[in-house]
Amino acid sequence: MSKATIYNVAIKAGVSLATVSRTLNNPEKVKPETRDRVLQVIKELGYKPNAYAKGLASRKSTSVAIIVPDMSRSSVAEMVNGIAVEAKKYDYSLILYVLKDKYADETEMMQEVVASQADGILYMNDEINEEQYKTLNMIQDEYGVPVVLANTVYPYDSSLTTVSIDYYQAAYEVTKQLIDEGRKNIFMLTTARKYMVNDLKEAGYQKAIEEAGLEMNIFRTSGDITVNTIHFNELLKENGHLIDGVVAVRDSIAVSFINQAIEKGRKIPEDISVFGFQNTKYASLSRPKLSCVDIPIIDIGVKAMYLLKKEIDGLHIEEKFNELPHNIILRQTTK
Amino acid sequence: MSKATIYNVAIKAGVSLATVSRTLNNPEKVKPETRDRVLQVIKELGYKPNAYAKGLASRKSTSVAIIVPDMSRSSVAEMVNGIAVEAKKYDYSLILYVLKDKYADETEMMQEVVASQADGILYMNDEINEEQYKTLNMIQDEYGVPVVLANTVYPYDSSLTTVSIDYYQAAYEVTKQLIDEGRKNIFMLTTARKYMVNDLKEAGYQKAIEEAGLEMNIFRTSGDITVNTIHFNELLKENGHLIDGVVAVRDSIAVSFINQAIEKGRKIPEDISVFGFQNTKYASLSRPKLSCVDIPIIDIGVKAMYLLKKEIDGLHIEEKFNELPHNIILRQTTK
DNA sequence: CTGTTAGCGCCTTCAA
DNA sequence: TTGAAGGCGCTAACAG
């Protein structure tokens, strides 16, 4: 049962290969009877068009490249789930690129993506910088391959379609909430300054803090649990008596902090109120259960793929910058 | 700067396109000087061979299909990370298929995979059944596309190369450990009976229990936290006073159980010892910290991809069934 | 509505 | 060591 080609089908159905091609791609252009006959033969032979020949001839691949930083982050994984669901609707296949310490030169990787003939690119990388943004822009303009940023924002430019939530506003809201609880020493637990999205959260936090005339406290640590555990221990030793509110840029960071705080005898939320970001399983599995910003990450994936498909089809996209609504989930780490 | 073709390179370098093709695929067959010249032009033009044309002409795609059940499970995501790292070494691209409630007919999806011209298939699906296994076998035999099962085992047949750990033995070991602690009423918390891997864990649990002359208690629930929380509540209400040991098939299930047990006033590990499976972030973030079986999931991904590459290259694989070593991690939920 | 005919960009004998 | 030429399987005008 070696693979049947369009040629085999044509012969067996007594038509030319053009007709076979048509019944597959423009069925309305072929007479119903012949169409049915061809379809019948296709079924008998188990014929599936060779994706490569098709892509070469049509200069379209019905595949999109999806570029992510690291699968193990649950926000990334969930988003990919959403993308996959939507891509399936259009019969698009997904070519996956995982950035994680593998591509010294990201520009080169982009070239690879272009060579892969993907019809479009879904880019998710919260470490995006100017060079990468420019490269993406270049690919879109020069090569005509549409790019959509998913859960990734680059605040200094807005020529690329992006789907995200309003992280600035979300951070502002939760910080405000802590202030309204009467918290005076609110810390933001964040990562090294290279994650754009986290910069946005910091800005939102800052706005709320300044409005209330409080003092800003930005504490940078790692996403790695063993590392941030040590950092939090030190932080709590030095400032343990001061901190009464925390906004963490990720759920897992929030939970890790809570664990250390409790170990140091602090009561959550009596002594310290804590907010996380994302609403992952960590949030519901932690004790006390974590209050957090709920990010519709699957929807972000779905919408990003949806918009990419529109761009691939040459349709006009009304809004370059798409913000999905977020939710504040109050559980047990806040009052 | 539209895409450069091999033809452009040939002209600019003053050679034929055959020579360009050779310097890329069989560099040793071209004189160093011309090779360098060609390479130089390639660089200048930013030329990347069109993957589709290449695939069509060579009947190889340098891409592998990777089939997974659901990205949001952290074991799956981690494994994909491992696969990506290894695939990068061979310059293979990854075509991702997510099964999650999307393919009514999996056989049809396999056809899609074949049509995609993937050189090989990495299959991960712990719900694998006879039909799926047969389809995979057929694809490997009829179409000559190698298949490797990653972290999924099908105990009733062994014609497909598989990479996993010895789940049976691991479950046996942790159950034994609980028995050695003096536990008498050890429950296994597992899922609906469709996950092969979990069947293996049950068997290992059973062996240890029977050896010790104890009573088996298999409790089936869902992986969904809100669902299993309810189940665990009922379980603890009915048997709360009996249970003194637990082996859960996933970390998240273990943590969810622990949370409910503590809420019911049970002390962990004094009253109940608990083991999880996988060693995910959930295990280190939970309080008390979860003891569990550490599964080298990234290595499984790496090795699966490694073996697949060997098969693609037509190399002989000594061992069809590859078991990587696991570890028992003792933390705070066991004595 | 259907068939003929060029390619799509690259690899790979076969000669030179 | 190199070039010429014929496909790989399919799409897309262009005729008919």
Image (cartoon, coloured by chain):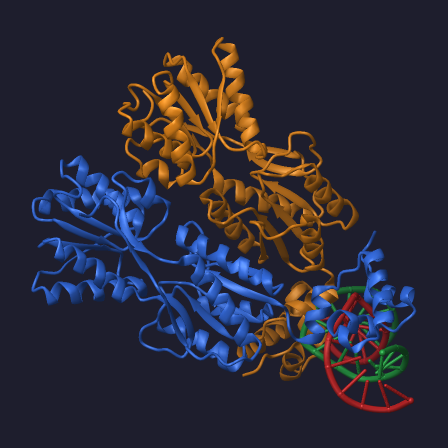
Chain colours: A blue, B orange, C green, D red
Quarter location, residue A188: bottom left
Q: Is residue A82 left or right of residue B138?
A: left
Q: Is residue A294 above or below residue D4?
A: above
Question: In the image shown, does B183 or A219 lie closer to the viewer?
Answer: B183
Locate residue B133, reporting x and y percent. Answer: 69, 39
Locate residue B129, reporting x and y percent. Answer: 66, 37
Q: Residue at x 69, y 33 (%)?
A: B158
Q: Is residue C2 left or right of residue B141?
A: right
Quadrant showing the N terminus of chain B: bottom right
Locate residue A170, reporting x and y percent. Answer: 27, 62
Quarter location, residue A219: bottom left
Quarter location, residue A153: bottom left
Q: Residue at x 56, y 62 (%)?
A: A87
Locate residue A25, reporting x and y percent. Answer: 73, 72
Quadrant showing the C terminus of chain B: top left
Q: How many discs appear?
A: 0
Q: Is residue B278 above or below residue A111?
A: above
